[in-house]
Image: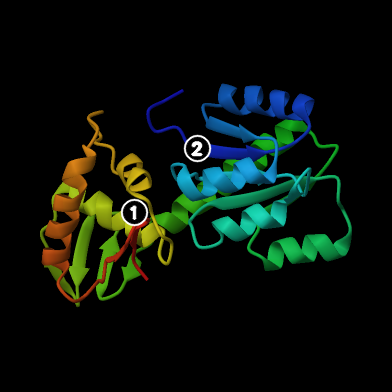
Amino acid sequence: MTECAKRILLVEDDAMIASGLVYALEAEGYSVTHCGNAADALRIAADGPPVDLAILDMQLPDGTGFDVREKLKNTNTAVIFLTVVDDEGNIVRAFEGGADDYITKPFRLRELLARVKRTLNQHADERNSPIQIGGATIDITAGKVHINGAPIDLTALEYRLLLTFAQNKGQILSRSQILESIWDSAGNFVEDNTLTVYIKRLREKLGESVSIETVRGLGYRVD
């Protein structure tokens, strides 16, 4: 598994299917987190590190794949439904709700892996497009930030911090989620007690162009 392995959340209650999928996906170089029910998946979606792709079973012991998709809807997480449910109503609902693909069981493993790769590539292309957040524009390709057309000077960590907020617009991010996301590329963890300092510096540089809201007891949010 590489340092920059794509993160996949697999929500599947059938232990045999899940075991085979985890093995196959990890063999392809992905980092996989498996949940067997909606409750665990919702907890990961809310408190765990951001994931690049969620593969969701439609029918779960304590809910549905739609419940998990709803939790992920304001993130940049791609979604593939993997389910025995093949009626038109659910398929339409899934795509109207933002699903990237819909695969019915039984499935061919090589085809599923190909669809996973295609979906992740499509989202990678979308993520390279400039992101607008408030009055700031993030040029992903160049790694630069402009406010009302004028460039601003951010450190690498401040840039990753702003990008994390931009990719999770409207979501409350806990301190642990933020720290996980801005983990130093050299492998050094950013200490929790310094996060407040970095956010303060970022606020000062952004001025009134982007509002980073402190949600007491929960974390931070940018709308």
Which residue has dot 2 on it? 7
Tag 1: residue type? Thr
Tag 2: residue type? Arg
Relative to residue 83, is residue 140 drawn left or right?
left
Tell me the tag on residue 138.
none
Please identify the quadrant where the C terminus is shown.
bottom left
Q: 19 above or below 223?
A: above
Give the image location of residue 98, x and y in percent: 63, 63
Q: 26 above or below 44?
A: above
The quadrant in which residue 19 appears is top right
Give the image location of residue 51, x and y in percent: 49, 44
Which residue has dot 1 on it? 164
- Residue occupying the point 50% across, 37% down: 7
Give the image location of residue 211, x and y in percent: 26, 71
Relative to residue 47, is residue 85 drawn left or right?
right
Mark 2 element type: strand
The quadrant in which residue 106 appears is top right
Can see residue 209?
Answer: yes
- Residue occupying the point 61% across, 43% down: 41
Q: Which of marks 1 and 2 is nearer the N terminus?
A: 2
Nearer to the camera, 33 or 150: 33
Nearer to the camera, 15 or 113: 15
- Residue occupying the point 80% across, 45% down: 83
Nearer to the camera, 80 or 221: 221
Q: Which residue lies furthest to the front in this view?
A: 217
